Amino acid sequence: MSKLGAKRKTPKKPMNRKQIKLLPLDLLFSKLVRMKADNTCEYCGKQGMQLHCHHGVVGRRYRNTRFEEDNCACICVGCHWFLGDFPKINADFFLKRIGSERIEQLQNLARSNNKPDLDLIKQLLKEKIKILEV
């Protein structure tokens, strides 16, 4: 057992190639979600907080829906913990936000075997951010 603040004795595992390729896209997408919400928590309405991009309908591990704007909400850290701990409240929040039809579409898209074009996604995200910055 190591003491708190002690240096690590074993090196960290390096990130795999998928993680390295997705990281810049995740940063762009998170920026877009925060800009669209005008840096306000979409659950409690607070401003000036540390905001997260919360994947509420389908988790971010599914690449087909990872960069779908309907699947995400800009929420503060407290609300992120709260919605993560209470899946029923999370489901109700997204049901009111996007509707049951869109939730079903996102769930079907997550289960499909289509591979997303990451270069196209990157280009689209940059264009949307550029439009919002003006």
Image: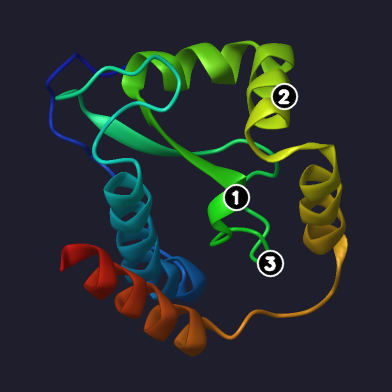
Point out the tag, 3 or 1, that comes first from the N-terminus. 3
| Alpha carbons under labels 3 and 2: distance apart | 20 Å
Near mark 2 (Cα within 10 A), the count class, few <14, some 14-19 or many ≥20, is some
**Residue 66 location (% of width, % of height):** 58, 58
Residue 12 visible within the image: no
Task: Give the residue number, with chain letter if any, for mark 1.
Answer: 70
Q: Are marks 3 and 1 in contact (CB under 8 Å)?
A: no
Q: Residue at x 49, y 79 (%)?
A: 121
Residue 31 occupies quadrant: bottom left
The type of residue carrying mark 3 is Asn
Which mark is drawn over residue 10?
A: none
| Image quarter in which the C terminus is found | bottom left
Image quadrant holding the N terminus, namely top left
Q: Is residue 7 left or right of residue 31?
A: left
Residue beneath label 3, please? 64
Q: Which residue is mark 2?
A: 91
Say if 117 sits above or below 10 in the image. Answer: below
- Local secondary structure at mark 2: helix
Alpha-carbon neighbours of circle 1 within 10 Å: few (<14), some, or many (≥20)? some
Q: Position of residue 99 (x, y in %)?
A: 76, 37
